[in-house]
Amino acid sequence: MKKTLLLCLLFTSFLDAQVIYETVPSLNFGEPRQVKIQLPRNYESNKNKDYPVIVVLDADYLFEPVAGNVDYYSYWEDMPQAIVVGIMQPDRMADSQYDETNFLPVGQGKLFFDFIGNELFPWLSKKYRLAPFNLIIGHDATAGFANYFLMKNPPLFNAYVSLSPDLAPQMSERLTDNLQRTDNKIFYYQATGSQDITPLRDATLALNTSLENIENTNIKYYFDDFEEATHYTLVGRGIPSALEQIFSIYRPITKKEFEDQVLNAESPYAYLIEKYEIIENLFGMNDRIRINDFIAIAAALEKKSDWEGFEDLGKLARKEYPETVLGSYYLGKSYEGKGDTKKAMRTYESALVLKSAGDIDKDVLMARAQRIKDDFGY
């Protein structure tokens, strides 16, 4: 029942997003390549917003599950909205071709490699608003092929989702060495399953042993070994797991994050600022701080009686949400905590014409102002 509900939600979510079929000119191939593109909801109305790009290889069968998950997770703000680009591959094995001597892309594989970096992305950048964060996802042969983009410096992609990869000879050693030495921030996810094709499973497990021992703070590595998953069913489990882990920093503050990190932070306000600085630095997105995150930080500040932090939070809320009561509410609480009750009362009263923010509305502010009047006789 739960699986059916999730599939229904993903399908409904996918229908809400805008899918476009495009033809990308290619001098490399001497003929155009077909792509499917899913734009985020409200893409046309958010004219000043840029979006990460998720490139889906094997788009003939991977595009819909990836696009549906991206739209679903971004709807709940568990990942940023993104432009999903699926490349149609009539001959996926030819697109993944490598030389039998040096095991690097050759023939159509080289043409396909150059097409993505030298033709697809310049074409995308002219038509769409792209943030400087790119993710690529592939399955078996195309998952193995995607690793070649890590050989470039800087790599074209910041994140890699490798589902039961079919690795070229020497790729495991090359990949491990590259990730050990790179100065670039890289997210790398791979998955296999207990019922995966045996040679692919063995190679993936061996690569996992190498990658999990890498000591490089620039690398965020994730791995799943799904019980009872076959070479094909692991894809349906790997896609949401990869998105959830790679974009974990982006999601709103969770109960676990609040208890384990926010409450233990020396300054909850500084924690909030750092969280959004990381999001901007990693994903190239300068998103407005969520109201729920303001509320979480305020709860931590109250537990710590950090009234200076409340003042900083109030000033930030006024900047982020000037149309709402949020900033005045936090500033008022700061002044109350510091003992300046008259200033707190006036701050509450000054915001009564503003809009609500979550459960914080003018009635809450009026009640706090009235309580101060009753207590101090103002």
Image: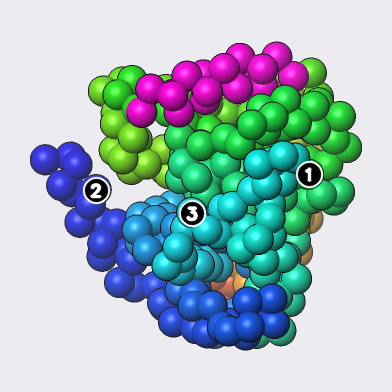
How far is mark 2 from mark 1, CA to CA?
37 Å
How far is mark 3 from mark 2, CA to CA?
32 Å
Judged by depth in the image, the label closer to the viewer, 1 or 3, is 3
N-terminal label among 2 and 1: 2
Q: 235 or 289: nearer the eye?
A: 235
Judged by depth in the image, the label closer to the viewer, 2 or 1, is 1
Which residue position holds label 2?
Answer: 6
Question: Magenta region: which residues?
Answer: 197-214
Which residue position holds label 3?
Answer: 93
181 lies above or below 13:
above
Relative to 38, is 82 on the left or the right?
A: right
Residue 27 visible, this orientation = yes
Mark 2: which amino acid?
Answer: Leu
Which residue position holds label 1?
Answer: 151
Q: Residues within 10 Å of mark 3 (few under 14, many from 20)?
A: some
N-terminal label among 3 and 2: 2
Residue 117 in picture, x, y percent from top left? 72, 65
